[in-house]
Amino acid sequence: MTLVNHRITLAARPVGLPRPTDFAHGEEPVRDPGHGEVLVKTRYISLDPAMRGWMNEGKSYVPPIQIGEVFRAIALGDVVASNDPALAPGDHVTGMLGVQEYATLPARSLTKVPPIAPLPVLLSALGMPGLTAYFGLLDVGRPQPGETVVVSAAAGAVGQIVGQIAKIKGCRAVGIAGGPEKCAYVRELGFDAAIDYKSSDVAAGLREHCPDGIHVYFDNVGGDILDAALARLAMRARVVICGAISQYNATGKITGPANYLSLLVNRASMTGMIVMDYAARYSEAIAEMAGWRAAGKLRSREDIVRGLAAFPAALNKLFTGENLGKLILEV
């Protein structure tokens, strides 16, 4: 019996928050793998804020998703059939499988992963969010023991890992998150303090919890919170620009930092980071983080939504603040 692939494609470029009509559901026969290819059945799909940027026309660090193209997504799946000796049926793999049930891809574009339980952790703490936190904080932020590290979206996929690595490295960790549940989770992870941007003044919270200033600010949101952090920088602070989720659905001009002169006054630096630049060192980072996890020093929470049809609504949870931890779609 011929397998049928159910998939989601981009139907229109959204203006503001994506709507259901910006996506299309379709199906097609599954293509058998050719030479050097494998057929993968998708199990878990990573939902990430960067996906919103991929929907826009224009230059970025990756080409935009084209209209009618399967929606790009990092995912984890099982090899069903293989035409390459590097992978065998039953192997777990990650890669750009897309938002679909099956994907036929070159074996070289996939990474074999161990059967860790639970598997979604391979898309969370030991996946791209964990790698982003690891390299963004350690290589770009360069925290030193005793320094204060502040991270926005601290209860999210990347933020939850940043704060824990900061603590492992002997730093003070302060998280900014939205709502009492998220702030409670941030404190549960071992952060020294949590600031609720929905119910309190972020600038006042930073003055209270960062009396010596911010030595490393790991930014995931941009906007007003970035400005508040810039106003509290310590001398020679490092600002890591990982994302700007507050700006991704802007319908007008993107709002840049108004307090950027704080970089001059405090001889600070602001650096953008894309995790793909560190691909040659992924195995190094995963090995160290897996060790921390085994020792109970690194935890994560996965927010799992089930069913391919739930993709459009699930993606928007990232921008409405509904998810807690790493958002994943179980196919």
Image (cartoon, grey):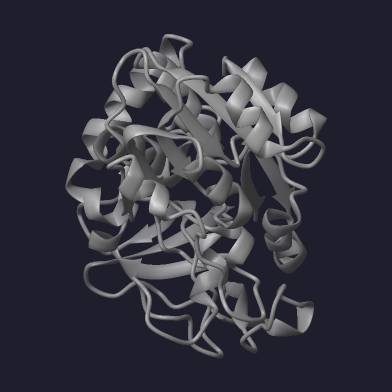
| Position of 9 relative to 176 (above/below) | below
Q: Nearer the viewer, residue 94 or 263?
A: 263
Residue lying furthest front: 265
Q: What residue is drawn where x is 52% and y is 60%?
A: 258
Q: Nearer the viewer, residue 142 or 35?
A: 142
Task: Specify whether 220 is left or right of 311.
Answer: left
Residue lying furthest top: 295
Q: Quadrant of residue 317?
A: bottom right
Q: Is residue 290 visible?
A: yes
Task: Specify whether 26 is left or right of 226.
Answer: right
| Position of 272 relative to 151 (above/below) | below
Q: Position of residue 186 (x, y in %)?
A: 64, 25
Task: Specify whether 272 is left or right of 40.
Answer: left
Q: Is residue 300 visible?
A: no
Q: Position of residue 13 (x, y in %)?
A: 61, 86
Q: Position of residue 29 (x, y in %)?
A: 55, 81
| Position of 75 relative to 146 (above/below) | below
Q: What residue is drawn where x is 40% and y is 17%?
A: 171
| Position of 331 relative to 152 (above/below) | below
Image quarter hosting the N terminus: bottom right
How many marks can you see? Answer: 0
